[in-house]
Amino acid sequence: MTDKKTTKISTILNELKNEKINTWFDLGLFMDKFKEKNLPSAFKGNASTFDTHIENGGIAFLTFYFTIDGITVETEKYAKTFKNIYPDIPIHFIAGEIKQEADELIPKTAFRKVIPEMEAFDAWPLYKDFFQIKMERGSEAYNNLIGKFWDEVLVLVEKLGSYIEENDISLLYLINVCSNPGNVSLALATVLISEYLGIPVINNNHDFYWEGGNRDVEIKKKGLKKGPRDFFFHNAHVGEFFSVIETIYPWESRSWMNVNINRIQQDHLINVNGHNPANVALLGTAVDTKMHQMSKRDIIKAFMQVSSIFANKKDSITVHTAAHHADSERSLKPILLGHKTVKNFDFVNNNIVFLQPTRVISRKSIELNFKLIKRLFSYDSFADKFLTNPQLKLSLIVSGPIPHGQQNYYHDLKKDFSEFLKELPKAFKSRVLLGFLFSEFDKNDFKKKHKKPLDIEQLFDVASLILLPSQTEGRGLPIIEAAACGTPIFCRQYEPREVYDEVIGRHLDESLRLNVLEFKGSKVPKKLAEKICDHVFYPQNRMVDVTHNRNVIKKRYSLEALEENIRYILQRMYYQLVSVSIENNPQVINLLKQYKASVDFENDDLNAILNKKTRHYLPGYGRLSFMHYLKSLIDPSFFRVEQQLVKGRVMRYARTMENDIPDLVNTNLEVIHKYYNAIDDIFKYVDGEISIRHDHALAYRHRNKKSYAYQAFTYQEVTGLVNMIYTDVFKPTNLPDLTLAPQFFADWELALFQLTNSKYLGIDDRKILTKNLKRMYLKAIFLVVI
């Protein structure tokens, strides 16, 4: 560990304190100027020195808190992978809180840093101000919040930035910091620190605030269902406030690799947020199948350890009456709830365990399991097993803790369980239990008591059924873990549906698809209950599925595949860092000039057709220097979103050129990055100043006079510029010589090929044209090919 003075952070703090951020408009304009700065990268080397630079400096994993949850479990895998790639790399775990139970997941050699101001959600002091108190422009809450927010940002820049500079950290790895606004102050502070210090960032997004969340006006207008993250849009009607979130979640920068866990997230960042595709990547997960190998003796020991947790430091377990513990302090510790109080309860023998390996969160829909159990007991074969064995019981166990802000859901869940027990036949009321472990097995006090302490992998192995009835999931890790251990899983087809399908492998050959017990909506089909009964009581009948799923996991989710994935991301990051420059891209400047000369071309024939003296003809909707969206004209800050959307449309077109067109395929990674970076540079080049600013011009809203060259074009014209860049970068071969083209065409296809050099057209309305020609609707046809 070094003991350097934090001279850079001190300078940065002084600069930020001199910024007069007194209103939300001030902050918006500051962010605009900050984004336009050409800040240099801290990395100045080449391919041979990149790995040395990362390994010598070290990596810092940043999140809100480390505990026993999906984020910490995944972070452990990332840390191990980086150690495999860089054996001597220093690893730092930085969070608002590092809970005791996370000790087993954090490497013993890792440095830890707790910064309380990094805590999130209910533990973040401004969380209610941002997402619960209704804000109106000019209100007291609106005016007071900006000062408190900016003060917090400065505190975090100082504390977090100082630690990063003192330890000479060379790579930041964020997990959900800039995807879910649990602490907006931290998100903005991280952006400022990374950009000012020139430190590259891998921004790992497990889930975004817009996944399962919408504006109230959109819900009403489009008839959308209410989602678990709608509350993040509580004050979305105040544009200058909400545009801060829309700008930094996630941040776009050449030195930021936005790494997502599914393709929907990836497409959203590029097509909607307008991110450079070269800075967007996918990262899969991995499981270690070797950990899921337990003998019968090990399973009995695991049951006994779970039993000791529920005993709560006593010699035996007491099952507590669910109806008596809706609000009790006792229910905040590991507890087993039932229809009535039972002393000296035997948890180990004659006990079927259904495990939901999640935290106690409303979107995990734990209450849906009650419907499953009710359906199972209505199935004769299942009920008969309990009738013929009076000692048999069923325990529904939830493994994880209650996060901040979920106490009300936990309260309602216990009440729902009490009501559910009333609906069961008398013979089964006392045979169904609900247990909460609150991750007790991951705490040091528990681990010290056992030579081979219980872990989450062993819980998967002892369970007869894994449960995942979630409304939404960023990935769905329990499905993968269940398949690895060979335990059947009961799961809902959660949203986004595309994410669920990708985990299952719907897009793959059957040999690579996972076999699960799935259902839709909130009803459990009778046939599914029959299958579950068979899986629980006759496990030998499902060995084919067990073997199949384990083979799928080895092929799709191995630790080796994860390492290969991260190496690929690091290679892409290198290409992006060496492209960072404070100078304009000369290739783009040259092509822009050529293209403008082509677009502005005039001759007597054109002037004979178009009256350009008194009219302005646009090849498209309108010049991009002006706002086109009505909302941008009404909302003083929506223009930033409009600019993202415009850039997103251009990037979507660029991806179509690179990925989808059959005659324009190129797989060279470095060249592909050069292509996308050139298109990204279109939006950065300023060719002068605007002498007159209209009130609906983007320059007016940005409060500057900068003339961005691309804004002289329409969107449609910019796609023509993308074509030029594509040709200049990829230099496609075997193009036809248009000088030899005949003066007439034998058919449509030949005509289009000779005019466009491609067999593919992004806009193809030939059928409409043919139909209208037959009806004699048209007076004249103008064919323009750019």
Image: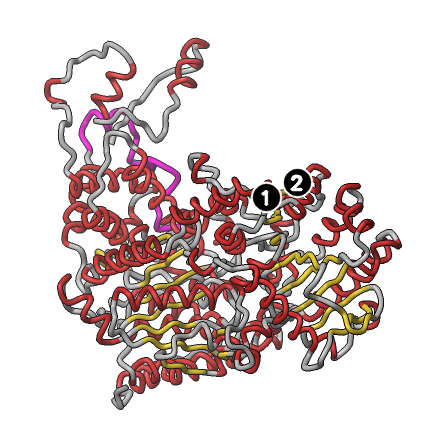
Give residue 531's mark: 2
501 relative position to 386: left or right: left
Give coordinates of residue 704: x percent, y percent: 33, 64
Q: Position of residue 713 (x, y in %)?
A: 30, 44
Which numbered disc flags the more N-terminal residue, 1 or 2?
2
Tag nearer the camera, 1 or 2? 1
Q: Which residue is mark 1?
A: 540
The residue depicted at 71 percent of the width and 69 percent of the height is 408
Q: Is residue 633 magenta?
A: no
Dots 1, 2 in contact, CB < 8 A: no
* Category of crowding for the residue at label 2, using alpha-carbon neighbours closer than 10 angstroms: few (below 14), some (14–19), many (at least 20): few
Q: Main secondary structure of the magenta part?
A: loop
Image: 19 above or below 38: below
- In the image, residue 701 above or below residue 623: below
Along the viewing direction, whichever of 167 and 82 lies nearer the viewer: 82
Q: Which residue lies at the image location 43% right of the left edge and 45% below the top edge?
A: 551
Which of the two residues, 660 or 715, is positioned nearer the viewer here? Answer: 660
Mark 1 to mark 2: distance in Å?
13 Å
Kindly tell me whether residue 648 is visible in this rendering: yes
Above-or-below relation of 28 to 683:
below
**Rendered image quadrant of residue 200:** bottom left
Q: Where is the N terminus found, in terms of image quarters?
A: bottom left
Q: Residue at x 44, y 50 (%)?
A: 262
Highlighted range, magenta? 602-626
Q: Secondary structure at mark 2?
A: helix
Q: Secondary structure at mark 1?
A: helix
